[in-house]
Image (cartoon, helix red, strand yellow):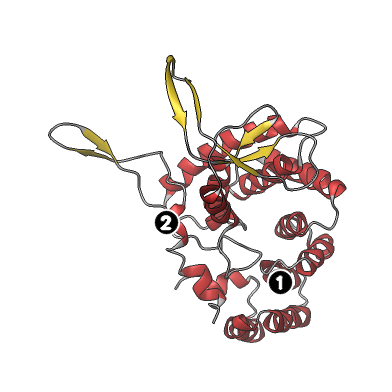
């Protein structure tokens, strides 16, 4: 039996095993012979890493598995830090095209070549951030952890922005630049992130106006930014495309519009579509009816 939403959201220690470790503010453990730096554990994610299907593994970790079982074409190259030395590349990475590709296109190789980008660390960072900051406001309780991840996001966002500046930037570059911008907005990194997220959403929708992932991110971005009426069409497309979390975002959207009946109907639809979530849906319906809750994440937050 599939786990209900509350468990999927709050009991995700198994997913954090491969999560990015924040390198900032790293404590040092001093031994007699040397200083060993240990990285602090990340907070458990509040939001499910896979918004399409809470019972499925995160897309990033699924890609890591695919990469690990693909044949490895080893390469011997010069060490970037010391060109006189050689190093052997023997582990597949996640490689995407940077230009001239309007669909998802990932390959698994030890090195990115011309017009390609290794997104292994980028995707790991984006997944880690999604766990706490996919929706606004973010749910960090550790200030040092948040600041460390914010610094890394700024760097990654700048890198992606430079690649996305190409008129023929690939879908894979644009969707990552879009997500980085939404996460930056949610983390209050500056108004420029809001502007960029809108621009990237428009470019992605020109490529495929029915893409479920783009519609989901654009839909909840509009809703949480005050554009609840505009968000409806995009959230509807996301639900039609099978994005599980789009139902809950739609509930929030209708509550913000003070349309309680539509919110409750959406929860009933959610319960039908995902019967394993019936208990959670019933709890949310009761909260909406009796408590006037305006945000489902309030109800699902740890006590």
Task: Report whether residue 138 is seen.
Answer: no
Task: Name above or below for residue 12 compared with residue 4.
Answer: above
The quadrant in which the N terminus is found is bottom right
- Which residue has dot 1 on it? 247
The quadrant in which the C terminus is found is bottom left
Q: What element carries label 2?
A: helix
Question: Within 10 Å of the Cα at label 1, are there few (<14), some (14-19), or many (20+) other Cα atoms?
Answer: many
Q: Nearer the viewer, mark 2 or mark 1?
A: 2
Q: Residue 238's spot in the image, x, y percent? A: 77, 64
For marks 2 and 1, give the CA distance.
28 Å
The earlier-in-sequence mark between 2 and 1 is 2
Does the residue at mark 2 contact the one at mark 1 (Cβ under 8 Å)? no
Task: Report whether residue 256 is seen.
Answer: yes
Q: Residue 229's spot in the image, x, y percent? A: 83, 64
Question: Within 10 Å of the Cα at label 2, are there few (<14), some (14-19), or many (20+) other Cα atoms?
Answer: few
- The residue that appears at 79% across and 40% down in the rendered structure is 101
Q: Is mark 1 on a helix, strand or loop?
A: helix
Please state if 90 lies on the left or on the right of 101 as rendered.
left
- The residue that appears at 83% across and 46% down in the rendered structure is 202
212 and 227: which is toward the camera: 212
Residue 17 numbered tag:
2
Work out which residue is located at the far top of the displayed protein and give it. Answer: 84
Task: Name above or below for residue 31 compared with residue 231.
Answer: above
Residue 130, image quadrant: bottom right
């Amino acid at each position: 039996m599939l786990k209900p939403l509350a468990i999927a959201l709050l009991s995700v220690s198994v997913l954090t095993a491969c999560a990015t470790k924040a390198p900032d503010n790293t404590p040092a453990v001093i031994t007699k012979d040397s200083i060993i730096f240990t990285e602090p554990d990340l907070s458990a994610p509040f939001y499910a890493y896979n918004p399409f299907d809470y019972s499925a593994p995160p897309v990033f970790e699924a890609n890591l598995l695919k990469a690990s079982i693909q044949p490895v074409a080893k390469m011997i190259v010069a060490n970037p830090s010391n060109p006189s030395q050689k190093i052997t590349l023997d582990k597949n990475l996640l490689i995407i095209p940077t230009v001239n590709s309007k669909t998802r296109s990932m390959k698994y190789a030890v090195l990115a070549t011309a017009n390609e980008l290794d997104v292994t660390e980028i995707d790991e960072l984006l997944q880690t951030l999604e766990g706490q900051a996919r929706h606004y406001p973010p749910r960090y309780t550790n200030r040092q952890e948040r600041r460390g991840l914010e610094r890394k996001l700024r760097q990654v966002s700048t890198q992606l922005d430079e690649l996305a500046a190409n008129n023929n930037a690939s879908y894979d570059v644009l969707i990552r630049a879009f997500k980085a911008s939404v996460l930056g907005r949610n983390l209050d990194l500056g108004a420029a992130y809001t502007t960029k997220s809108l621009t990237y959403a428009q470019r992605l929708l020109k490529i495929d106006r029915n893409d479920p992932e783009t519609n989901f991110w654009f839909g909840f971005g509009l809703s949480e930014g005050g554009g609840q009426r505009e968000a409806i069409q995009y959230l509807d497309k996301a639900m039609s495309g099978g994005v599980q979390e789009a139902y809950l975002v739609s509930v929030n959207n209708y509550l913000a519009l003070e349309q309680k009946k539509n919110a409750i109907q959406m929860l009933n639809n959610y319960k039908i579509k995902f019967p394993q979530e019936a208990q959670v849906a019933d709890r949310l319906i009761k909260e909406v009816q009796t408590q006037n809750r305006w945000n489902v994440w309030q109800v699902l937050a740890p006590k």
